[in-house]
Image (cartoon, helix red, strand yellow):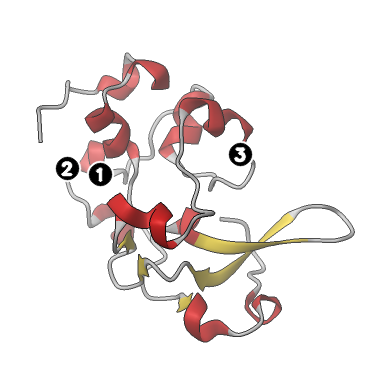
Amino acid sequence: MGTLTPRFWETKRLEEMSREEWESLCDGCGKCCLHKLEDEDTGDLVPTNVACRLLDRRTGLCSDYRNRRAHVPECVRLTPAKVRTIDWLPSTCAYRLLEYGEPLPQWHPLITGDPESVKRAGESVSGWTVSEDEAGPLEHHMLDRAL
């Protein structure tokens, strides 16, 4: 791993970031790896507590990030262009925040220097999800809150 430019997220646009900088923006919360359902009446997306089969539900990280699309073809590879069009990214997502000129949350690992700060802040899905392989119907797992 190379060396990150100090506070690069404050001076670079998403398109200008190196691959290492881009990847470091992900806080590892796992929220984007939860299944969502679309409300037939409103078109709104409703999050569930059902995680992708590749999500390590203890750590909140993908268990095979490099090869995830081989196992889960519908897994979305984020790009700056996709960040602008995807409406299901969590409100705390660094990619989304930076695209819209917002600062990173104070608990973000790039701010704290500690990847565990996401869990301590209560922003990780670690500990409260079920794997899609064990869940059954998603309708039984809808959350009553936004992510």
Helix, strand or loop for disc 3: loop
Res 138 seen here: yes
**Label 3: which residue?**
86
**Label 1: which residue?**
109
Label for residue 113? 2
Proximity of marks 2 and 1: CB atoms separated by less than 8 Å: yes
Q: Residues within 10 Å of mark 3 (few under 14, many from 20)?
A: few
Q: Residue at x 89, y 59 (%)?
A: 41
Q: Is residue 43 left or right of residue 59?
A: right
Residue 91's place in the image compared with 80, above or below, is: below
Amino acid, disc 1: Pro
Helix, strand or loop for disc 2: loop
Q: Residue at x 32, y 37 (%)?
A: 25
Camera-nearest residue between 106 and 98: 98
Q: Residue at x 46, y 31 (%)?
A: 79
Camera-nearest residue between 67 and 106: 67
Proximity of marks 3 and 2: CB atoms separated by less than 8 Å: no
Residue 8 at x, y = what percent? Answer: 26, 21
Q: Residue at x 43, y 71 (%)?
A: 53
Residue 72 at x, y = what percent? Answer: 46, 60
Residue 103's place in the image compared with 131, above or below, is: above
Proximity of marks 1 and 3: CB atoms separated by less than 8 Å: no
Q: Assign the C terminus to one quadrant of the image.
A: bottom right
Amino acid, disc 3: Ile
